[in-house]
Image (spheres, rainbow, N blue to C red):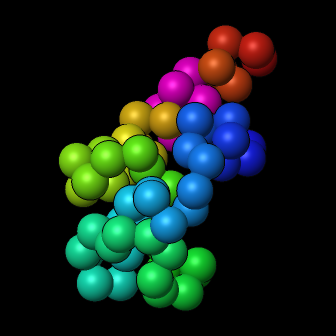
């Protein structure tokens, strides 16, 4: 999914969650392997682990329904 599809035009105006440090970053600052994002707001980035878990749960439910 492209940044534009996420509604984000400038990657420097995005927020990322650093999984190594547990901190929110403004713009892509750390290595991509340590980041989750991009997110449109600081608040969304701070909830990155929760958002990822929710998406994974939904995908698992969809796959189970297809079986």
Residue 47 to residue 58: above or below: below
Q: Position of residue 7 (x, y in %)?
A: 58, 35
Residue 21 in view: yes
- Judged by its main secondary structure, the magenta piece is helix
**At x 60% / y 38%, what residue is drawn?**
6
Residue 30 to residue 58: above or below: below
Q: Observer-nearest residue: 46 or 41?
A: 41
**At x 33% / y 54%, what residue is drawn?**
45
**At x 41% / y 45%, what residue is drawn?**
40
Q: How many numbered marks are there?
A: 0
**At x 60% / y 30%, what residue is drawn?**
59
Quarter of the image where the N terminus is located:
top right
Residue 55 falls inside the magenta stretch? no
Quarter of the image where the C terminus is located:
top right
Q: Observer-nearest residue: 7 or 38?
A: 7
Q: Position of residue 19 (x, y in %)?
A: 37, 75
Residue 49 in view: no
Residue 4 located left or right of residue 42: right
Residue 60 falls inside the magenta stretch? yes
Q: Which residues make up the magenta segment?
A: 56-61
Q: Which residue occupies the extreme top position in the image?
A: 65
Q: Position of residue 47 (x, y in %)?
A: 26, 49
Q: Observer-nearest residue: 27 or 46?
A: 27
Residue 61 to residue 14: above or below: above
């Amino acid at each position: 999914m492209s940044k534009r599809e996420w509604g984000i035009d400038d990657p420097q105006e995005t927020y990322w969650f650093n999984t190594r440090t547990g901190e929110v970053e403004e713009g892509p600052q750390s290595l991509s392997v340590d980041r989750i994002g991009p997110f449109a707001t600081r608040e969304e980035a701070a909830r990155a682990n929760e958002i990822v878990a929710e998406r994974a749960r939904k995908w698992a439910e969809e796959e189970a329904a297809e079986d």
